[in-house]
Image: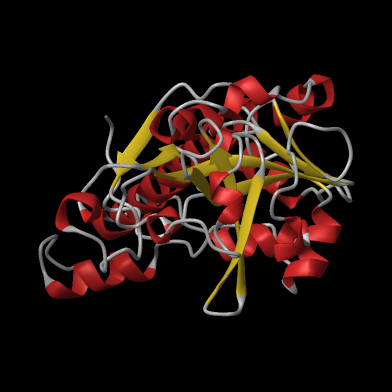
Amino acid sequence: MRFPPNSAQAQSLTATNVPSSGSSPPTAKSCCEVEMKRTQLFKRTIRAKKTTRSKESEDDAPKLTRSKITTAIRAQPLPKNLHFPVANSHLTFRSSSILSPDFFQIDALDLAPRLLGKFLRRDDVVLQITEVEAYRPNDTACHGRFGITARTAPVFGPGGHAYVYLCYGLHTMLNVVADKEGVGAAVLIRSCAPVSGLDTIQQRRGQKTDKPVLLTGPGKVGQALGISTEWSSHPLYTPGGLEVLDGPEPENILIGPRVGIEYAAPEHVSALWRFAIAGSPWISAPKSTLRPP
């Protein structure tokens, strides 16, 4: 039986006679699916290449950045009995000589900044002076204002001797006597940086730290040196005991009003007679009152 070519029966018969193995052309839907798969494969390939290039770039980059180097250095343990917070301190103090009496026998206001960078040595402990205060004759904040007494007599001695007193009966304060004998002037050592004998310093201070809190304050300096009021009048220019050694002059200094002298006359309270090494972390509070000269 023959059917018209465009009839439904003819179309049904044609579809039925198509082999299942099929050599028929792909439909529009199947073409889209293939194209999508190819596109996705292409994208995956591109991403993989980008990732590879990024990894290669990372491999080519320097491994040690500045921050990594700094972290590595900080992680290294400090050598025992040795600490160098100030540049070249360990090289300088070993070859330094004890300062002569003439060095100290000048006005306290001139001596104070000259003491910055110098070294205090007692046995294995070496400290570098980082902060000082000047006290002059006729200064209402100076102990010499009371005249010569059993306590203040060392202040009136010749420059280059130690004047040690107790503050509040607790803190041992070290001063370097200035000027000529009979003048009555001194320089208070407010802060230092540890250079040698760190273990001894920590033991005396009762603090296992190498941070500035260890020596920023005059009472801490006296405690770290292990001195008492018996050291008053000790000559700092003779070998043995407590000595002042020559040291590097700081590049820049800071000045400001002295600390804790509110009882003094206004002109002495505001006087800029406090001196410190600029940029040093080994400075006591308050730091906000310090400024360049």
Up/down of 34 relative to 206, above or below: above
Answer whether residue 213 is visible to the viewer in this image.
Answer: no
Q: Which quadrant of the view contains residue 156? A: top right
Nearer to us in this view, 205 or 139: 139
Q: Nearer the viewer, residue 255 or 68?
A: 255
Q: Residue at x 77, y 26 (%)?
A: 98
The answer to whether residue 175 is left or right of residue 11 is right
In the rendered view, would you say 118 is above or below 48?
A: above
Residue 203 coordinates in the image, percent (x, y): 82, 68
Q: Quadrant of residue 204?
A: bottom right
Nearer-the-camera pick, 269 or 6: 269
Q: Is residue 262 left or right of residue 34?
A: left
Instruction: Look at the image and tell me whether residue 104 can be seen.
Output: yes
Residue 166: x percent and y percent? 59, 70
Residue at 50%, 44% (x, y): give it.
Answer: 186
From the top left corner, tell me how far across and down residue 227 is, in percent: 76, 61
* Residue drawn where x is 55% and y is 21% of the image: 249
Q: Name the residue nearer the viewer: 260 or 247.
A: 260
- Give the left or right position of residue 185, taking residue 4 as reference: right
Residue at the spot 58% in from the left edge and 31% down from the top edge: 117
